Image: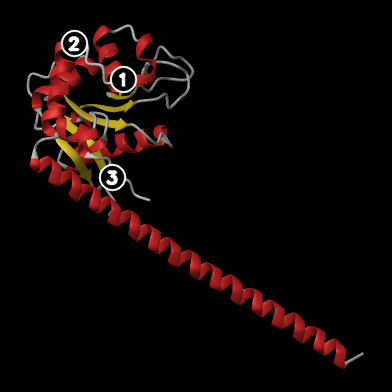
Amino acid sequence: MYFIKPVEELRFTDDFMFSYVMRNKDICREVIRRLLKIEAREIKYPEAQKTIAPIYSGKGIRLDVYTETPDEVVDIEMQSGSYIAIPQRMRYYQSILDSDSLLKGSSYTMLKKSYVVFLCLDDPLGHGLPIYTFESFCRENKDIQLEDCSQKIIFNAAAWEKCGDIEIRAFLEYLKRSEATDKFLRRLDMTVDKIKEVQEFVNSYLAYNLHEYDVQERGRIEGAAMQKAKDERLINQQAEEIARLKALLAEKASHP
């Protein structure tokens, strides 16, 4: 059964609210500064729920928040539920970001430094770290970095108390407990509350959920139809086998 969370109960960590709030340039810039330590003097308008469809595939991926600075490209994903195949998903997202840049005319040497960031309310890897940062290095000598200008970072809000960086710690605590403990987070929390009163947001949220419900319902119906066809094929195969065995027995009975 598809559940639509009431608008008044939405938090920053809810996917649709997160994407909507992060359209705000100042908030997006501060989140990037706080998490990645990037001072983005200029930032292209953040694109919420951006869909990138690679040229070699008709199926695109929908990014929660995609934005660029003069030197970086950043994808930030909010993960409040499923943590299935996160490493593989991060790998795929990274490849699509690069493909998107190349299709826009960039050469390999002009690719910006890219960050794929997953904000998780719980620990998807199970090692208790507040931050997991992944870069490419040489297995034979870990001092040798590939320096391909890409990072994949998982922030684990469940381990916020272990984080040594005060700003990141406060942000992770806000994700996990909704406790706004500094000026920026209080502003962020107020922004979330104000957005809930915006009719345009409410309409968009309801339309988004109706679309998701339709997609899920179509999938359920198609899945049921496929299962029915599979069951019918199995029944027919069993009937054919029974008929074959009966014919075989009848033939043996007629020739004792």
Cα distance in 3D space between marks 3 and 1: 22 Å
Q: Position of residue 117 (x, y in %)?
A: 29, 27
Q: Amino acid at mark 3?
A: Ile
Q: Which residue is mark 3?
A: 4
Nearer-the-camera pick, 202 or 137: 202
Q: Which residue is mark 1?
A: 177
Q: Which residue is mark 2?
A: 182
- Which quadrant holds residue 202? top left
Q: Position of residue 41 (x, y in %)?
A: 7, 18
Cα distance in 3D space between marks 2 and 1: 14 Å
Could you classify mark 3 by the number of other residues whose Cα lies within 10 Å: few (under 14), some (14-19), or many (20 or more)?
few
Colour convention of the picture: secondary structure
Q: Of marks 2 and 3, which one's residue comes earlier in the chain? A: 3
Could you classify mark 2 by the number of other residues whose Cα lies within 10 Å: few (under 14), some (14-19), or many (20 or more)?
few
Label 3: state its secondary structure.
Answer: loop
Residue 107 visible? The answer is no
